[in-house]
Amino acid sequence: MDILLGILAIVVVFGLAFLMSNDKKNINYTGLGIMLGLQLVITWFMFKTEIGAAIINGISAVFNKLIEFGTEGINFVVGGIVVGEGGVFFFNVLLLIIFFATLLSVLTYLKILPAIIKYVGGLISKITGLPRIESFNAVNSIFFGQSEALIAIRSQFHHLHANRLFIVCASAMSSVSASIVGAYIQMLPAEYILVALPLNMFSALMVASMLNPVVVPKEEDIVDVKDVSDDRSVFEAMGNGALEGGKIALIVATMLIAFIASLELVNWLIQLVFAGITLQQILGYVFAPIGILMGIPMNEVIDAGAIMGTKIVTNEFVAMLEFQPMMEFMSEKTIAIVTVFLTSFANFSSIGIIAGTVKGIDGDKARLVSGFGMKLLIGAILTSILSATVAGLFI
């Protein structure tokens, strides 16, 4: 029964994307089939084979070791501060972003990451028939945040008409930055977060290329990774990466304060009219139907829907913090589905971040992004539903 519901959820996602498409005749159905097949194979391999489990455990072990290294740096700076049981979220989780951002900056300066991204993106383009820039950006978005991913292809922006711009923005919005994956792993199961990364990459490409299909002449499909870093030495790369990571940590902390406080304010206002009702409960009922299709058990779907809705109206960190204490009472299937759903930047605030980044690169194209902002969010929500549903099929 769960498999049938999951298949129905996938059909619903593709059906909605088809109905919203602005060019149904040019949808690349062969590419869609290949990417969905790759998703199913990857998820089956990771969850159902010993080799896949070993790969996930190995990657998790690498992240945990990196977290240990990052914690040493944090303890040197703030180790003398006495805190209560459980520590301080800013110290224990957010400051780790600094170390991970430093590593990414160094790997980018050394042209290790750009080479991997270019050739993996090229392979995806060849297999699926999608344009190279869109495929490159989809892989790039696994490692870098929304702004950084778009900045990395700024030299190709003159090639991007409206539909192509939509797809690269959708990939940026439906992914997460590798610099904050370490923070996510501190809150939710690592295996589901790590599987969400490739699932979201393919889901974003599938949904976006249905919503806004593209046909690109060969001469306009060029990817350049020569000038991805402005750093002049590995030490400058370390310094700039650390500063960028510190900025991200402070931004996340600031947004958490604002969103959590605002959520409490909204709940207080709601309860003035409807005693005992919260925004989370309302969102739970709104998302319950799709949660059932995704495979979440009936007795958990309201609570799970509340977390998914919270993620969209606030951000993934707020939702993860609310979901963390609930996992003790949830089934493994629900934990997997919700974790994959939460592992993306699909929320209202991301529209502004992406529009602002594009404006800094090309003011004319920023107006295009503002015009399809809500369509971007709907596409990102469909992406999260698709990824979480595929993951749930194998739990």
Image (tube, rainbow, N blue to C red):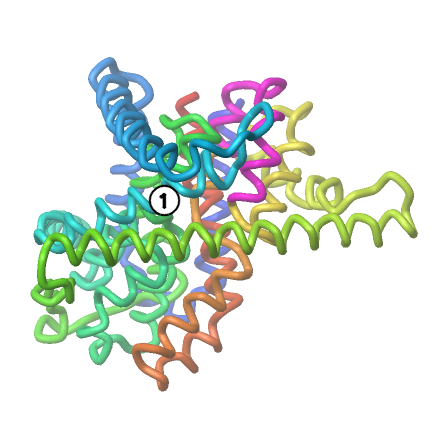
Image quarter of residue 96: top left
Image quarter of residue 85: top right
Residue 285, x across and y down, in percent: 72, 41
| Placement of 381 over or under 325, stated as above or below | below
| Placement of 146 over or under 352, stated as above or below | above
As for residue 246 lying within the magenta part, the answer is no
Q: Kindly identify the amino acid type of the residue bearing the numbered disc 1.
A: Ile
Residue 41, x across and y down, in percent: 26, 30
Q: Residues within 10 Å of mark 1 (few under 14, many from 20)?
A: many
Type of secondary structure dominating the magenta stretch:
helix
Q: Residue at x 24, y 61 (%)?
A: 134
Q: Residue at x 57, y 36 (%)?
A: 321
| Residue under label 1 | 97
Image quarter of residue 313: bottom right
Furthest residue to the top?
Answer: 50
Placement of the C terminus among the 4 image quadrants:
top left
| Placement of 317 over or under 322, stated as above or below | below
- Please state the extent of the stretch shown in magenta in the rendering: 317-338
